[in-house]
Image (tube, rainbow, N blue to C red):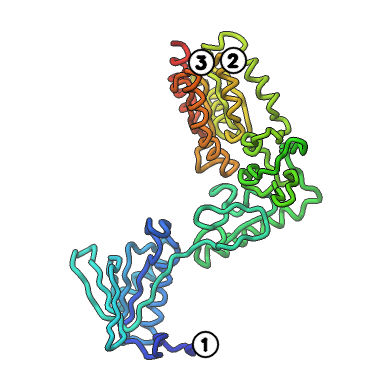
Amino acid sequence: AAGPTNGELVRPSDLKKPKKVAFINCVGSRDKRFNPYCSNFCCMESIKNSLLIKEHWPDVEVTIFFIDIRAFGKGFEELYSRSREEGVLFIRGRPGQIKENPITNNLIINVESIDTGTIFSEEFDLVVLSIGVEGSSESIPFPVAKDSKGFYIEAHPKLRPVDTPTDGIFIAGGAESPKDIRETVTQASAAAGRSRNLLSKEEFHVEPLYAFVDTNKCTSCGTCVSRCPYGAISVDGEKKTPARIIPVLCKGCGTCAADCPTNAITMTNFTDAMILRQIDIALRENASEKVLIFACNWCSYAGADLAGTSRIQYPTNTRIVRTMCSGRVNVSFIKHSFNRGAGVVILTGCHPQDCHYISGNDFAIKREKRIRNWMKKNNISDERFVIEWISAAEGKKFADIVSQVSKIALK
């Protein structure tokens, strides 16, 4: 026996042994007001603790209030069944009220049973809350992005679950999302293996795709810092020094370059001049009949490629300009396309949740309002600018969209 109570079951307020214990699951979890996600291991923790109580103190009554019991792991369903056999009472329902009895200091729980529709009101000596798991509010001194819940973002949920978008940094366990011990150990082992593979190399090669800053144009506004999910850009706001980009951390998405108000950032291999020249050539003849498509390298461009290799037919008046990310598409590119007489302009990219560069297409979609306001001022029909998200596997979707939109250009 160990711990602050030497292994004895007591309630913290007066150290008395409880005769009736209640567990309330999903406190702060699966609730739009707090955390909408499941905390993963709370159900089984409450079941495990209820069994421990029954094994050591059989006379103690145990009740578990729950929304759903998620017993998904190996042996979990058997543990759940065993707890019911041991006499643990399960009531499906979220308690709406907990009051303290001023005489006994016990807690009175009021809840409506979802299964029976009856109101349950019972007094308990001890109430245990399964608090929802949240991501850490603190940040590690490394450039790793977090999601809105405070958990670090993996490079890909299926193909690279322990890698982060920043090469050489790996995540495991609760840093990535709520996990039980078994899953945490599994992921930690995978992260260790990935680290070993990296350390075994004498040299580490990176793609020659990165941004660099024209220090004469940079005003130290910091816009680029907010656009980079990799922490590759830094600006000293107090000293007003030009933005500094670490090439080995930069992934070359180009979102920072597209939103730089002074055009101080240039992308290697995808400069503004190169992209504008592609637009000019694509619209050199019969521009008004052309459908100009900005396609991201990883998804929509690959989707277009799949349409071609699958021999899916679509109109020949299509012209594609490849960028690494939809976030690279500057508003000026769209304006330039229409000024050159493009019939229709389509901005395509990964589905928002699958963006190869985490947040590139989020910033791309934020530019839509500016684009449409400019179009309205210049009497350009709204239907001539289209935004679509296309994955690498959606070749048919790409062809269908192009076929539909090309009719607008040929009006």
- Using the numbered discs, state the Cα–Cα distance from disc 2 to disc 1 in whole angstroms: 77 Å
- Using the numbered discs, state the Cα–Cα distance from disc 2 to disc 3 in whole angstroms: 9 Å
Disc 1 target residue: 2
Instruction: Give the number of the mark in front: 1 or 3.
Output: 3
Q: Residue at x 50, y 89 (%)?
A: 1
Instruction: Give the number of the mark in front: 2 or 1.
Output: 2
Count of numbered labels shown in the rendering: 3
- Using the numbered discs, state the Cα–Cα distance from disc 1 to disc 3 in whole angstroms: 76 Å
The numbered mark, 2 or 1, whose residue comes first in the sequence reads 1
Residue 23's tag is none
The numbered mark, 1 or 3, whose residue comes first in the sequence reads 1
Residue 346 on image: x %, y %:
51, 25
Instruction: Give the number of the mark in front: 2 or 3.
Output: 2
**Dot 1 amino acid type:** Ala
Disc 1 secondary structure class: loop
Q: Residue at x 50, y 66 (%)?
A: 180
Disc 2 target residue: 340
For the C terminus, the image quarter is top left
Q: Is residue 108 left or right of residue 167?
A: left
Q: Residue at x 28, y 85 (%)?
A: 102
Picture layout, residue 76 above or below residue 307:
below
Disc 3 target residue: 343
